[in-house]
Amino acid sequence: MRVMIFGAGFSGKAAGALLASAGHTVFGTTRSAEKAHMLGDSGIQPLIFDGQTVSPEVESELSTVTHLVQSIAPGQEGDPLIRLFGKQGLRSAMPALQWVCYYSTVGVYGDHDGAWVNEESPLSPVSQRSLERVEAENGWLELGSRDDLPVAILRLSGIYGPGRNTFHNIAKGTARRLVKKDQVFNRIRVEDIARATAFLAERNTGGIFNITDDEPCPPQDVVTEACRLAGIEPPPEQPFETADLTPMARSFYGENKRVSNGKIKALGFSFLHGNYKQSLEELYHLEGWNKFAF
C-alpha cells in the first residue's frame, strides 16, 4: 500500500506509524515544517499541507497513492479535501486510489439519554462541530459512490493514549471529577484507532464503524481509577452545573450515550484496550508514572 494521511496528528500519526512498521509506504501531512521531523521519526514521509492548496510535491505523491486517510476536521467551510477534489472526483488526483478512510466522531449521534447506539442509530448532532462532521461524512460517502470506491467512516469516541491521558492531567493539576447525574462517555486508545485503520485498509473494507471501547462510564470514574493507581487522593467531586467550563467543554456533557463497537468486531477485529481500567494500568507502567512522585 501507498498511504496518504491528511492531518497526521495524534491519531493520524499513530495510524501512519503502524502502517509504516508493517512495510507500507506512508505519507503524512502537517501544517508546519517544525512538526515534519516528528513524522519522519515515526516512519512517515512528511509533506506540508496548509488546508487550502495542494503543492506540487503533494500532487506528485497523490498520483501514486492507493489508500487515503482524512483526519482533518471540517470547519464552517466544510471538509478541505472535498473542497479541493469534490468537483472533479478523487480519481482525477489519485488514479491509483483503492480505499478511503474518514475519521469522524461519535458526536454525530448527539444525545440519546444514556441509551446504547450503533451505526444504524439516528443522528441527532447537538453541536455545530458535529453537524459539520455529518455533512463531511455524507460528502465522503457520495464521493466514494461516484468513483466506485470503498469509504470507511470511523466514528471515534474520546481519544487518549501515551502522552495524552488522565495521568498527565493529574500531574499538571488539571484533573477534575465533574459529576452530572447518569452521564456516561466512551473513550478509545489511539493505538486501537491505528489498528482499526490498518485492519480495514488491508481488506479495502468500506462502511461506517464505531471505534470505541467496551465500557462507557461516568467520566469521574476514570479520574478516580487513575488516582488509585497512582496512590493519591482523587480531587473532590464537583457538580457539573456549577463547574467553570469553556463552552466547548460544557457542550460535551450535552451528549449522553453508550456507543456499541459490535459491527467492526463482527468482522474479526479485536480491541486491545476495551477496558479503561486495564488501559490505565498499562499506561501507568508504560510511561513510568509508577516511578513519578505526584
Image (tube, rainbow, N blue to C red):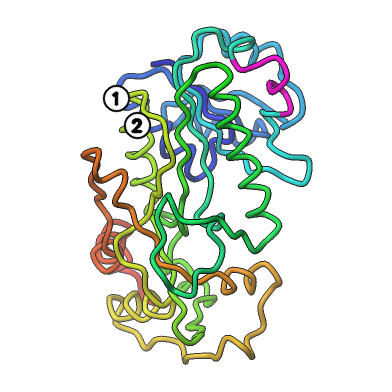
Asked if 18 appears above or below 89 in the picture, the reply is below
Amino acid type, callout 1 = Ala
| Callout count | 2
Q: Reading the chain from its start, which is encountered first: label 2 or label 1?
A: 1
State the residue in front, 227 or 98: 98
* Element on which disc 1 rests: loop
- Residue position marked by numbered label 2 in the rendering: 200
Q: Residue 253, percent across and down? A: 57, 74
Q: Name the residue rendered at 53%, 58% in the picture.
A: 109
Q: Residue 7, percent across and down? A: 58, 35
State the residue in front, 288 or 260: 260
Amino acid type, callout 2 = Leu
Q: Residue 181, percent across and down? A: 48, 87
Q: Residue 26, percent across and down? A: 45, 22
- Mark number displayed over residue 141: none
* Element on which disc 2 rests: helix
Q: Name the residue rendered at 37%, 55% in the picture.
A: 212
Left or right: 22, with 49 as reference point: left
- Residue position marked by numbered label 1 in the rendering: 22
Region rendered in magenta? 83-90
